[in-house]
Amino acid sequence: MQLNDLIQSCKVDHLGIVVPDIERAAAFYRDVLGFEVGQPRELQGQGIAVTFVDFANTRVELLMPTTPESPLGDLLEEHTVNHFLQRVPQGGLHHVCYAVPDFDAVMARVHTAKLRLLGNGKPILGASGRRIVFVDPKCTGGALVELKDNG
Amino acid sequence: MQLNDLIQSCKVDHLGIVVPDIERAAAFYRDVLGFEVGQPRELQGQGIAVTFVDFANTRVELLMPTTPESPLGDLLEEHTVNHFLQRVPQGGLHHVCYAVPDFDAVMARVHTAKLRLLGNGKPILGASGRRIVFVDPKCTGGALVELKDNG
């Protein structure tokens, strides 16, 4: 695959927004923007409820904690949705997920550039069954970036 | 236009990320993800430097303040890039811009839902020459949302 093809197929998979009240946030997307927004789904074992808004070109993921302590602390460190809402009670933009076609090549460059990955630094399987990692925001210019294997 | 068509063409136009060092942030997108990232461009009169990263499906806008005080305070209130970096010195996800095909219909629903718009509440012309507004994050579930006329 040529570099140009790689670039062409690197996509914003979704944008994660942490919200204190998922029904109220969903109302903005439904009543103002006109989307159909499904019922929030609780992710077993993760302590969060999620719903997706399907835009024409990408997705917005609304995230709300459902337990006082996040079971994902080992993975996300101080970037769990719980920690986020403690810092920003009104909610806000939490992470952006980039789907990359050549995950192994990107991971090699992550290591070459000595970027720090959250958790134990190893990819895990995300909800979609694809490998994901979270890059420390200090290493991306500020944003919490999820990289997803889209190969 | 049918509701379904409206939904299909409502897009994430771009995702704005405020960064303390735009060259360093650009390096992540260039060296790790493999994008060509253009030289940052200073927006005259706005006190910010910007560069865009063109993903296959949407764009990421990297934003850095270039003046100690933002000239955009009247528009963005406490949500200028300067205010943002004071609160979050390492930078982070700042706003998301949704391009809507029927701007007037969306604005009518914004008013019906009594959502507060930043600044004087009137649309202004953005850099692309299209009408834009910023919705108070308190009214969207937490995220600072820019609505752009894409009709």
Image (cartoon, coloured by chain):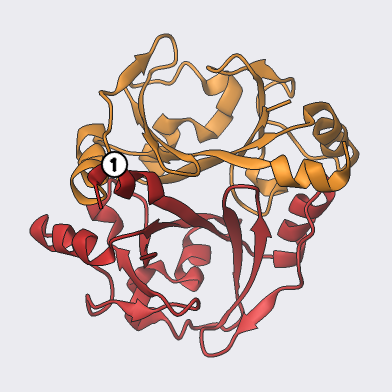
Chain colours: A orange, B red
Measured along the vertical axis of the image, is residue B32 above or below residue B20? above
- Residue displayed at 41% across by 42% down: A55
Closest to the observer, B42 or B85: B42
Q: Residue furthest front?
A: B1
Q: Position of residue B116 (x, y in %)?
A: 19, 64
Task: Give the residue at mark 1.
Answer: B4
Which amino acid type is shown beneath numbered disc 1? Asn
For the image, the number of numbered tags is 1
Residue B21 x, y percent position in the rendering: 70, 65
Q: Give left or right: position of A151 versus A46.
A: right
Secondary element under disc 1, as helix, strand or loop, is helix
Which residue is at a point 48% across and 30% down the rendered structure image?
A: A80
Residue at the extreme bottom: B45
Please tell me which residue lies in front, A4 or B86.
A4
In the rendered image of this protein, does residue B95 appear above or below residue B32? Answer: below
Q: Residue at x 71, y 57 (%)?
A: B25
Does the rendering let one see residue B115?
Answer: no
- Asked if residue B110 lies left or right of residue A124, the reply is left
Instruction: Please indicate, yes or no, whether residue A69 appears anywhere in the rendered image.
Output: yes
| Disc 1: host chain | B
